Image: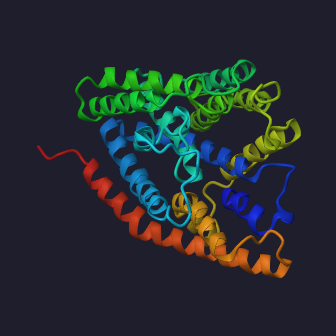
Amino acid sequence: MAVVAEHMLPWFLPSLRPYWFSLGVYGILVFFLVSGYIIPASLERHGDLRRFWVSRAFRLYPLYLAVAALVVGLAWWVPVRAEVPRDGAAVAAHATMLLDVVGVGGVADTMWTLSYEMVFYLLVTALFVMRAHERSGALSVLFAGLSVVVGLVLAGAVVTDGWLAYATGAVFAAGLAAVVSGRFRTAGACLLGLMALVLPVLGGRVPWLGVAVLGVMFAGTAVHRWERGTAPLWPVAVTGALVAAAPLGAIGSGWWWVQPDVWITTVALAAATFAGAMALRGRRLPRALTWIGLISYSLYLVHHPLLKYFVQVTGDLRRAPLPVQLSMAAAALALVLLVSALAYRFVERPMQRLGRRAARPAAS
């Protein structure tokens, strides 16, 4: 909902948008912490890479492809944004979800974060195969520290040519085929892990941020290990401090949301929210919050295109009277929630069920 508010307020209620922290970055950081906490635990619980990847594919791709098809299908009305190349590189990048780390914009603006989710999956897969997955704390500190260094030397992507998307697509397909089939699994996983390691620096549009995101995700994993009593908590604190410091000297950090006071406040709020959620585990949450969590992936992917279409119909509301802004914002939010619920009911949930069946080992 924080990301929805970040995208809604500038167009519907600009006077209410906060600038002392970034709502969008706050929501994304919390998401990455939660993902880091959950995803490796899910893999380790079953210990089955094929099952992990099949379930992840059915979890992420159906809605992702549906939203991409919607945006492209309605491009005659609301054009696809200019950051999306009109060539095969865009197709290759969307097929892997590695958009942001190969320098390709997503057809839906929010798709860029899925690049780092996929990078994390690839790294976790390689670590699991190499039996190095318990070193989450050290990895979180390593990536957070590297983000500081990368920020000092790189302002943008090292490789900007379209061939990176094609090459990445080929490695992605070959590596995943090896991992899922079981043939050359170790080689395939290590190849994918190596690719995931270098892409945020080579092709990431904001290299220091991409590396910092990986530090945040491994910090979430480190919290899980601390909770189980298998690792200390201090690496999480060190990671937080390094991530907070990452943009302070970075040469590619001219945006308002990475100014020192704004960035540090945003990081602190995200950490406090995650800590608060951890403290409330086991307690019954309000049904509305549980429902929002259930449809959160649909909400995240569909809201931005829907808001664009809504504004296309209503016109620019930024100078409209406040009562009009409030009523239109309420209507837009209701539309987003309704479509998200329908997307969960008719796309996400059936595909997740199908994925669970497909992930089961074949009967001997």
Residue 253 quadrant: top right
- Left or right: where 80 falls relative to 236: left
Q: Would you say 76 lies left or right of 252 here? A: left
Which one is nearer the viewer's eye here, 50 or 104? 104
Q: Residue at x 63, y 54 (%)?
A: 281
Which quadrant does the N terminus fall into?
bottom right
Seen from the viewer's position, the closer of residues 162 and 250 is: 162
Say above or below: 275 vs 63: above
Residue at 87% x, 49% y: name it.
20
Task: Depth check: give the residue in front, 128 or 76.
Answer: 76
Q: Position of residue 226 (x, y in %)?
A: 61, 34
Q: In the rendering, at what x and y percent does residue 188 appear?
A: 33, 24
Residue 206: x percent and y percent? 66, 32
Q: Please say whether residue 134 is visible from this viewpoint.
A: no
Q: Residue at x 85, y 38 (%)?
A: 259
Residue 80 image position (x, y, % from top left) = 54, 55
The one nearer the camera, 259 or 244, is: 259
Q: Is residue 72 left or right of residue 227?
A: left
Image quadrant where one finds the C terminus: top left
Count the numbered circles shown: 0
Q: Quadrant for residue 195, please give it.
A: top left
Q: Residue furthest left?
A: 364
Residue 310: in sight, yes or no? Answer: yes
Q: Is residue 359 shown above or below 148?
A: below
Q: Residue at x 66, y 70 (%)?
A: 311
